[in-house]
Every structure is written in structure tokens, then in C-alpha cells.
Image (cartoon, rainbow, N blue to C red):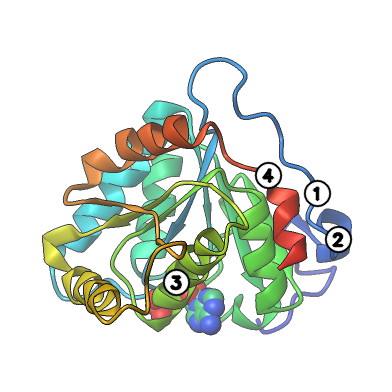
Amino acid sequence: MNELSPANAPKTSVSISETASSEIKPGRDTRAGGSTVRSICVYCGSGVGTNPAYVEAARTLGASLAESGIALVYGGGGLGLMGEVARATLAAGGAVTGIIPSFLSSREHMLREVTDLIVTENMHQRKQLMYEKSDAFVALPGGIGTLEELVEQLTWSQLGRHTKPIVVANIEGFWTPFLSLLDHMRREAFIRNGLEVRFGVVERAGEIIPRIEALADEAGGAGDPSRLSKL
Ligand code: AMP
């Protein structure tokens, strides 16, 4: 299967035109009762990496999301850590929204068993929808795609376009070289007053949701998503 046609598209698939516009719409009220965070976007590798701790972390996070009643938003693939976190969330009774561009549906083994499957026309729509549908972001270990998505959220936050929590899951020190690079940028005064990069770092998967909820409380909610359209 390459491109999705109406005949072979999964029942849950909807086209981008039905779900998103070029303008980001105001988000739902995430402050109403209980946790302020209803959905978390997980960025992670389409591979599993070499350390079994990465898969373990993805599975732990998936189960924790389901137990917390927080929906998973992710890139829609069935491979690597992406597939692991999605299947673990579903297995524990959680809700999963997969958002994948049509050109990757075959290559990344699009997971059809998800609660809500959205096939977009391109990468930009995928990333915008992942942003819109999420109250917070977490980066598990991953490759260039994961890095790009994490850095994009950090830059939007740095520029004051949103205040949604961002957590780096530094499983077995995976992100330490990246954190060192940010420290280097601070020392060299490229990250300076007024351009602070705000995010949390945790070492274990079990700490991700509590840290996100703490950051959401500090920020006073998930911010104003409509600001992003002014980027
Ligand atoms: P990776 O971390 O490279 O294994 O990629 C993880 C996910 O990020 C995959 O679903 C990729 O399709 C996606 N991805 C790759 N490149 C980009 C990009 N430039 N922007 C957003 N997502 C990307």
C-alpha cells in the first residue's frame, strides 16, 4: 500500500481538510476539573535503538498515559518506539490519536488499531495537528525526526508562542549530549536573557507525567494555541 485511497483507507481515517484549517483554533479548556493535561504528544524514534531501556520506557509511558486517563498523540507509525508507546497505551485501555502523512503510511507501518487515525497530506499538516491536539510534549529517545520535532516545540516556546509543557525524557542519558549543547549555547550567550528555553528533564519514564502536570500548573494551563498562527 502506498497512498491511501477511499477504498483502502481505515474507517477511522479522516482527511486533513475535515480536521484542520490553516489557522490554529483556540484549544479546549484544559483547566476543567482533575488534571489540567488531557493529551500528551510523544515524539520518539521510528527505530528502537540499541538499549532495551528505550523500549521499556516507551511501554511504561504508554501504560502510564492510559492509567492517568491522558490520551496519546503521536506520529501514527507502528515501528520502533512510536509503535511501542502506542501499543502499550492501547493495551492498557488508553486513547491514541495517530497523525501520519500519507507518504509515510506505508514506510512507517501506519498503526490502524488506534482510537483516532488522521492521515495528512504533508509533514507540515502533521506537525500542526500534533501541536493542536496536545496539551504537552515529551521527547523519548529518537533520531533526527524526533530531534526536529522537539527543537521545534522548544523554539516556539522560546519565542513565546505557547506555554505548553515540554519534557525531555533523558532515558539512560540519551539526551545528555543535546542538553550539553544547550548549556554550551547558554555559555556562549546565544541562549540569553529573554530567550530562555523552558522545559523539564526527567531520567525515568515514570516521572514524565508528574513533571508535565507540575509544569502545566506552573504555566497556568496549556497556554493560548491561537498565538502560534502569528509565528
Ligand atoms: P526518527 O526520530 O528520525 O526515527 O523519526 C521519528 C518520527 O519523526 C518519524 O515519524 C518521522 O517521520 C518523523 N520525522 C522525520 N523527519 C521529520 C521532520 N523534519 N519533522 C517532523 N517529523 C519528522
Disc with the residue nearer the chain's start (1 vs 3) = 1
- Looking at marks 3 and 2 on the same chain, the residue that comes earlier in the sequence is marked by 2
Q: Residue furthest front?
A: 193
Mark pair 3, 4: CA separation? 19 Å
CB under 8 Å between callouts 3 and 2? no
Q: CA distance from mark 1 to mark 2?
A: 8 Å
Q: Cα distance, mark 3 to mark 2?
A: 24 Å
Separation of marks 1 and 3 at Cα, in angstroms: 23 Å
**Mark 2, residues whose alpha carbon is within 10 Å: few (<14), some, or many (≥20)?**
few
The kind of residue tagged 4 is Asp
Mark 3 Cα-neighbour bin, 10 Å: few <14, some 14–19, many ≥20: few
In the picture of the structure, the residue carrying the numbered disc 1 is 25
Look at discs 3 and 4 and give the one toward the viewer: 4
- Whether tag 1 and tag 2 are in contact, CB under 8 A, the answer is yes
Q: Look at discs 1 and 4 and give the one toward the viewer.
A: 4
Q: Position of residue 111 (x, y in %)?
A: 54, 61
Q: In what quadrant of the picture does the N terminus appear?
A: bottom right
* Tag shown at residue 224: 4
Quarter location, residue 95? top right
- Residue type indicated by callout 2: Ser
